[in-house]
Image (tube, grey):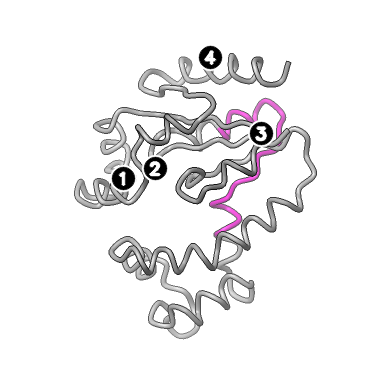
Amino acid sequence: MKIAVSGSIGSGKSTVAAYIREKGYDVFDCDEVNRKLLEKGEEGYREVQKAFPMCFDEESLNKEKLSAIVFADEEKKKQLEAIMHPLILKRLFERKDDPLFAEVPLLFEAGWEKYFDTSLLVVTDEDLLIERLILRGLSKEEAAARLKSQMSVAEKIKRADKIIYNNGSLDDLYRLVDDWLEEILC
């Protein structure tokens, strides 16, 4: 069984994924695979260097510059995703875990729900999301821009198989995840 965990930036999807790992399951982390693919010498690095040469200083990728470009220009964002998404999917399909959990931030934006048997969407109120992103070092404007660049939560809710609301305590979140795991794995 392939199980996707998704949610907007700051929603708590990584916290959920970490908790699933603590429960003894391996979780494929799309962001981590993306980071690895952007290391010098990797295929993603080489392809991004060809497409975005202005983001490389003395042969090293300036990720802040790349982020600024793709979050400001939808076409550039699509161009980057067209490079990275197939590479990430290839690594995902190489995995034979059963169940296979995957933390997929852009599950619905990328249309990847078709690759999974079920999906969990972690949802948090927007004010709380912005607070969390500010604590990560983004300005209020940057946080709002990142959220705006993603599909609306209402649309994600329509497409998800299960929704967990993460507006309470960590213990509350863990209880909801435990209930969901029992539902899907029994």
Which quadrant of the figure has residue 7?
Answer: top left
Q: Which residue is mark 4?
A: 175
Looking at the rendered structure, the secondary structure element under dot 4 is helix
Asked whether the beta carbons under mark 1 and mark 3 sit within 8 Å of each other, the answer is no
Looking at the rendered structure, the secondary structure element under dot 3 is loop
Residue under the image location 54 percent in, 68 percent down: 83
Residue under the image location 40 percent in, 39 percent down: 8
Front residue of this view, candidates 48 and 74: 74
Residue 70 within the magenta-colored segment of the rendering: no
Asked whether the beta carbons under mark 4 and mark 2 sit within 8 Å of each other, the answer is no
State which quarter of the image contains the N terminus.
Answer: top right
Q: Give the foreground label among 1 and 4.
A: 1
Q: Which residue is mark 2?
A: 9
Q: Measure the alpha-carbon separation of dots 3 and 2.
A: 23 Å
Q: Give the foreground label among 3 and 2.
A: 3
State which quarter of the image contains the C terminus.
Answer: top right
User: Could you tell which of marks 3 and 2 lies nearer the N-terminus?
Assistant: 2
Q: Which residues are magenta?
A: 17-34
Residue under the image location 62 percent in, 31 percent down: 118
Q: Amino acid at mark 1?
A: Leu
Q: Measure the alpha-carbon separation of dots 1 and 4.
A: 27 Å
Front residue of this view, candidates 30 and 183: 183
Furthest toward the left, the residue is 141
Q: Amino acid at mark 2?
A: Ile
Q: Measure the alpha-carbon separation of dots 1 and 2.
A: 7 Å
Q: Residues within 10 Å of mark 3 (few under 14, many from 20)?
A: few
Q: Which residue is mark 3?
A: 117
How would you classify the magenta stretch by its main secondary structure?
Answer: helix
Q: Measure the alpha-carbon separation of dots 4 and 3.
A: 22 Å
Asked whether the beta carbons under mark 1 and mark 2 sit within 8 Å of each other, the answer is yes
Q: Residues within 10 Å of mark 4 (few under 14, many from 20)?
A: few
User: Could you tell which of marks 1 and 2 lies nearer the N-terminus?
Assistant: 2
